[in-house]
Amino acid sequence: MRTLKVLRFTGFGLLGLGAMGLFVLVTMLLWNWLIPVLFHGPVVTYWQTAGLIVLSKIIFSGFGHGGGRPGGRRHANMGAGEHRPGREDWWKRFNDRPNREDWWKRFEEMKKGNSDSPTVE
């Protein structure tokens, strides 16, 4: 039973390494096919491609926290009485904004010199 677990672990490990190696190879082939022709960029080796993949992972994803799942709790640090602004708050702010037509009329009057400054109520 223990031998089966070791073999399974080793098999999945080798399968993962093979998948990563294949990903690096495909990325290298795509880079060397497109980048030199389109942008007159350099041709890269296998290990340079692996380094570029690791570098892009660090730059675009960071080091830690693993892969966050979509829809996970983003506001875990909020207190008991606090809530995240939702659609209701947005619509309230949207409906409470100044009337655009009135503002535009006041602006035109200000340009003509009839008023000191446009005021927002």
Image (cartoon, helix red, strand yellow):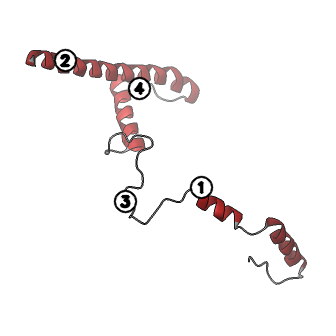
Give the mark count. 4
- Quadrant for residue 93, please give it: bottom right
Secondary structure, mark 1, is helix
Name the residue carrying label 3: 77
Q: Which residue lies furthest to the left in this view?
A: 2
Mark 3 to mark 4: distance in Å?
Answer: 45 Å
Residue 87's disc number: 1
Mark 4 to mark 2: distance in Å?
Answer: 35 Å
> Which residue sits at x=33%, y=23%?
20
Name the residue carrying label 4: 44
Secondary structure, mark 4, is loop
Disc 4 to disc 1: CB gap under 8 Å: no
Name the residue carrying label 2: 8
**Mark positioned earlier in the residue sequence (1 or 3):** 3
In the rendered view, would you say 48 is above or below 56?
above
Mark 1: few/some/many CA within 10 Å (<14, 14-19, 20+): few
If the image is split into quadrants, where does the C terminus sit?
A: bottom right
**Mark positioned earlier in the residue sequence (2 or 1):** 2
Question: Percent position (x, y) of residue 114?
Answer: 89, 82
Question: Percent position (x, y) of residue 82?
Answer: 44, 64
Mark 2 to mark 3: distance in Å?
Answer: 40 Å
> Which residue sits at x=83%, y=71%?
102
Mark 2: few/some/many CA within 10 Å (<14, 14-19, 20+): few
Front disc: 1 or 3: 1
Front disc: 3 or 4: 3
